[in-house]
Image: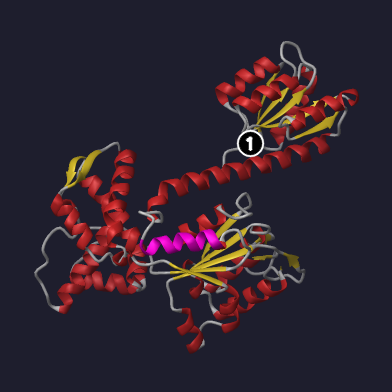
Amino acid sequence: MPSPIRLLIVDDDPRLSHSLSAWFTDEGYEVSTAADGEEALERVLADGADVLLVDIKMPRMDGLELQRRLARERPAATVIIMTAFGEVGTAVRAMKEGAYDYIVKPFEPEAMSRLVRKAAERQGLRRENRQLKERLEAEAPTLVTAGVGPMAEVLEQIALVAPTTASVLVTGESGTGKELVARRIVAASERAFAPLIVVNCGALAEGVLESELFGHEKGAFTGAGHQRKGRLEEAHRGTLFLDEIGDVPPKVQIDLLRVLEEHQLRRVGGNQEVEVDFRLLCATHRDLEAMVEEGSFRQDLYFRIDVFRIRLPPLRDRPGDVALLAGHFLERFSRQMSRRAEGFSDEALALLCSHRWPGNVRELQNVIERAVVLCPEGRIEARHLPFGEDHRDLTLAGIEAAHLERVLAGCGNVTQAARILGIDRTTLYAKMKRYGLRRGEP
């Protein structure tokens, strides 16, 4: 759950501070108070604050000076000026120097509540953007390698399409980083500060997916005890990312196409049209053209989503990236686990670079995480890798068993391994039983 917005009320009138504090605490904010600008500045520098309600006239440090100090020392804080009618000019000056808005005393609590809610939404979007940037920076090497080779074209395509409103289809094998491409497009777009709603279409059954996307009205089906907005509504004025769009069943394809054409939707069990405006990004590991030919994917929907295509190359086509990515993941997991892994032996690095990586970057990430667990300090050796031993059974069954063993070891998760292998979990469990394999074991 996201942490509550921290609200600081700065006013030398204790009755007003107490009243506002009680009001906004009831509305779910984390509220504190300060009697003047100096006390407020100390609190913000020590503990932080998201939104400040600041009176202009106060002892020691007035609201205008507090705003100036915050603009220099805590520019991320949002300041709302509370002012008497005769001080509006001062409040306007504060806005020119960085204040978010002002409100004239005496004010209606509902008016103040609306203003604070808008400021809180602004701070929430800032938080999301910071978190997105941090994630992108942490994951950057999975996309940004040496700036040459197959990924250079991908980066150019992202830069080209991000500022537009065009629908984008990201294709590539499982584990190549399709969602990360979508997030980079959003971060460089005009909707960077708006919601990004992610739906994995392949993980939901048809009835569940329909309700998840379109929402439902109270009583629409058994268990629908209240109205619920769908993910398409939540993406309004933002971006919707539909992962594994090729797994959307035909009935939902029809409803989705209607939304894309009319920018309206109906919740399940409802008759009212709801306006929606979102940018659509999709991803799939499937061959949508072949699905269109065989009739399992609508051609008109395909043309809607495939306005601009970005193909992510598999890791086996980027051999020069393996060592760089392995080093990046080694540094990350060593830091997270407080380990002191210092690099790779020549044999381990040769094994990493010669492996075919059927699970792509996701498999490499899991292999390095496992190696850091097995090697708390020193160099990663061949024995720390799941494919470090020589499998000598060259029969078809032996090769399949060895491959399943490597993928399971790299994932440590049957669901993820099944997705990488392109089979369902029931089939994978049957094969594991046949070859005597256990989940996550090398």
Query: Which segment did they paint magenta?
Result: 149-160
Question: What amino acid type should be assigned to the residue bearing mark 1?
Answer: Ile
Q: Position of residue 141 (x, y in %)?
A: 38, 51
What kind of secondary structure does the magenta stretch mostly adopt?
A: helix
Indicate yes or no whether the magenta region holds residue 158: yes
Residue 284 shows up from this direction: yes
Q: Residue furthest front?
A: 148
122 relative to 287 in the view: left or right = right
Residue, x 74% and y 25% (percent of image)? 54
Q: Position of residue 301 (x, y in %)?
A: 59, 78
- x and y percent of residue 363 in the render? 31, 59
Image quarter where the N terminus lies is: top right
SS at badge 1: loop
User: In this rendering, does residue 224 appear at all?
Assistant: no
Most foreground residue, 157 or 329: 157
Please determine whether, in this image, residue 166 is positioned above or below residue 11.
below
Q: Which residue is mark 1?
A: 5
